[in-house]
Image (cartoon, grey):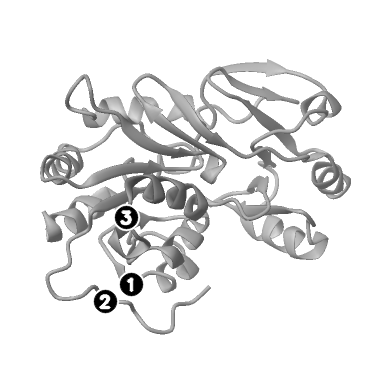
Amino acid sequence: MVRTTARLPDTGWIPKVIALDIDGTLLKWEEGTGASSEVMSAAVIEAVGRAYDAGAYIVLASGRSPHGMTKIADMLGLPREADERLWIVASNGAVVLRYPPLDVVHEELFDAGPAVRAILAEQPSALVAVEERGVGYKLNDHFPPGELTGTMTLAAVEDLIKDPVSRVIIRNPEASAEDFLEMGRRLGLQGISYVVGWTAWLDLMPIGVSKASGLAHVVTQLGLEPQDCLAIGDGRNDLEMFDWVGRAVAMGQAVTDVREAADAVTLPVDQDGAAVEISRWF
């Protein structure tokens, strides 16, 4: 997905909604792992807070499960007042919630069985996890340390996929992201949408569900339009959102296809690129 012409905002444009990826955007990646540092810089916290205080809607938009995102809101110190509630797009758009308290207002479910079985036929050693909303994950074996949060419950694969789910994670530490990209193209994975992460990490979601669809639900509730939105991210799971919003900004360390899909590229996460972009407007 390459944007052929940048959609520059009109003169005087200021984002009314700021959609923020978390890992690799607000939080730095820990080198050599698939986990983020869980430490947010003061510059990022201050810039996000300044935009919020100026009246912008801050929307956290991530592949993380809901319980893995509320603590990021807490780190940002949002919302400010007891009667305010933050919008959160979790699970790559499959779950939309308000916080605090954690209140799911929209959720998409699907039958992941056929896709998971097809993938395991090619990657029999792959790890499989499904979200237990508000709890953690059910999984067929443990993921590398730090990659998942919450309570982990071991179960057979067929038990994981016997009921409709909002999201499935496939992980194989012995493979590469390129292996997963090629497998996705080869299998077709009919009836679901999928996104490959930095490593051999594959997210399966309902067809048509993405961060863009989750953000669209929020923006509609706010009575606003896509053109009112600024999105900042670094992953392939941000591509649909980048195509939907008024201004899309990629983090400096993002892979080439993500940078090419953006209107602009900011500094890398370890140089507080999200704060730099937000400070352009607030």
Residue tagged by mark 3? 224
Describe residue 176's horizontal placement relative to residue 216 as left or right. right
Q: Say which quarter of the image contains residue 37.
A: top left
Q: Secondary structure at mark 2?
A: loop
| Labelled disc at residue 38 | none
- Across and down, in percent, residue 45 comes to 19, 38
Q: CA distance from mark 1 to mark 2?
A: 7 Å
Q: Amino acid at mark 3?
A: Leu
Q: In this picture, is 36 found above or below 260?
A: above
Given the current orientation, which residue lies at the most extreme front position? Answer: 223
- Across and down, in percent, residue 94 comes to 57, 41
Q: CA distance from mark 1 to mark 3?
A: 21 Å
Residue 24 seen in render: no
Describe residue 60's horizontal placement relative to residue 136 as left or right. left
| Labelled disc at residue 8 | 2
Q: Secondary structure at mark 3?
A: loop
Describe residue 151's horizontal placement relative to residue 20 as left or right. right
Q: Residues within 10 Å of mark 2 (few under 14, many from 20)?
A: few
Q: Nearer the viewer, mark 1 or mark 2?
A: 2
Query: Given contact means CB atoms under 8 Å apart, are the residues at marks 1 and 2 in contact?
Result: yes
Q: Of the two numbered discs 1 and 3 on the same chain, state the one appearing first in sequence.
A: 3
Residue tagged by mark 1? 263
Q: CA distance from mark 3 to mark 2?
A: 18 Å
Q: Say which quarter of the image contains residue 124.
A: top right
Please give the name of the residue rendered at 63% of the width and 29% of the height, measured from the top-left corner: 143
Query: Given contact means CB atoms under 8 Å apart, are the residues at marks 3 and 2 in contact?
Result: no
Q: Residues within 10 Å of mark 1 (few under 14, many from 20)?
A: many
Q: Secondary structure at mark 1?
A: loop
Q: In this picture, is 251 found above or below 9?
A: above
Q: Say which quarter of the image contains residue 141.
A: top right
Please give the name of the residue rendered at 34% of the width and 56% of the height, measured from the top-left corner: 231
